[in-house]
Image (spheres, rainbow, N blue to C red):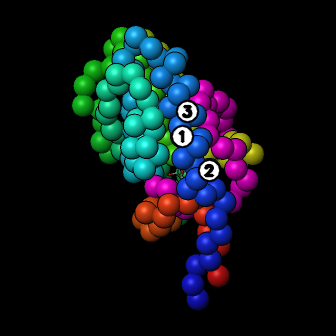
Amino acid sequence: MHDSLQVLLSQEQIAKKVEQLGRELSHEYQGKEPLMVCILKGAVVFFADLIRCITIPVKIDFMAVSSYGKATKTSGVVQILKDLDSSIEGRHLVIVEDIIDTGLTLNYLLENLKSRRPASLKICVLLDKIECRQVEVIPDYQGFVIPDEFVVGYGLDCADKYRNLRDVCILSRP
Ligand code: IMP
């Protein structure tokens, strides 16, 4: 049996939203040269599009984290697989994440990064499954609120599949 994919957000809808987020960030970080931090791997497509919609100077860095748990749910136990390349003390940080579900991953990450004393720390997330939250994490910049469905595409995966789809799709498995 095959997986079934149903488009939730089209590439056109996503592109429009990403441009809007880029404009907002360009306005709010004028003169601050923010450090844009991509959380690998899921945010990579969003990140690449977003930074090109920002019209002020930015720097970029990458972090990779893994959360242990069942295949499609996180447990809150987070391991840093790749850390930032340099110190963030005194820098204006924008964490770029693909999706917030329970909030456990970002909650851990935020506590970890705050202890390194950045000048400011904000979250920009493309997708927010607000109804699934287990700990309070409120994104400062948010693309879309989506229902409690498992989604893939535009960087998001299921067992490393589907990241290269242009749309965000709901995945149903037989
Ligand atoms: P949280 O810790 O529950 O907020 O989960 C965040 C992480 O779980 C994301 O960075 C994704 O890697 C993964 N995740 C949560 N929901 C989905 C989904 O619908 N599709 C793909 N990955 C998801």
The residue tagged 2 is 13
Number of marks in picture? 3
The relative height of residue 55 versus residue 89 in the rendered view (above or below) is: below
Kind of element beneath mark 1: helix
**Which one is in front, 41 or 31?**
31
Whichever of labels 2 and 3 marks the residue nearer the N terminus, that label is 2
Question: Amino acid under label 1?
Answer: Val
State the residue at coordinates (44%, 68%): 161
Left or right side of 137 for 76: left
- What x and y, as percent, mark residue 119? 42, 11
Q: Quadrant of the C terminus?
A: bottom right
The relative height of residue 157 versus residue 143 in the rendered view (above or below) is: below
The residue tagged 3 is 21
Mark 3: few/some/many CA within 10 Å (<14, 14-19, 20+):
many
The relative height of residue 62 versus residue 118 in the rendered view (above or below) is: below
State the residue at coordinates (46%, 45%): 46
Cβ–Cβ below 8 Å for labels 1 and 3?
A: yes
Kind of element beneath mark 3: helix
Q: Quadrant of the N terminus?
A: bottom right
**Which one is in front, 71 or 15?**
15
Q: Indicate if the residue with disc 1 has its beta carbon within 8 Å of ligand 1.
A: no
**Which one is in front, 14 or 60?**
14
Question: Amino acid under label 2?
Answer: Gln
Question: What's drawn in magenta, residue-wise?
Answer: 134-155
The residue tagged 1 is 18
Question: Amino acid under label 3?
Answer: Leu
Mark 2: few/some/many CA within 10 Å (<14, 14-19, 20+):
few
Mark 1: few/some/many CA within 10 Å (<14, 14-19, 20+):
many
**Which one is in front, 117 or 96?**
96
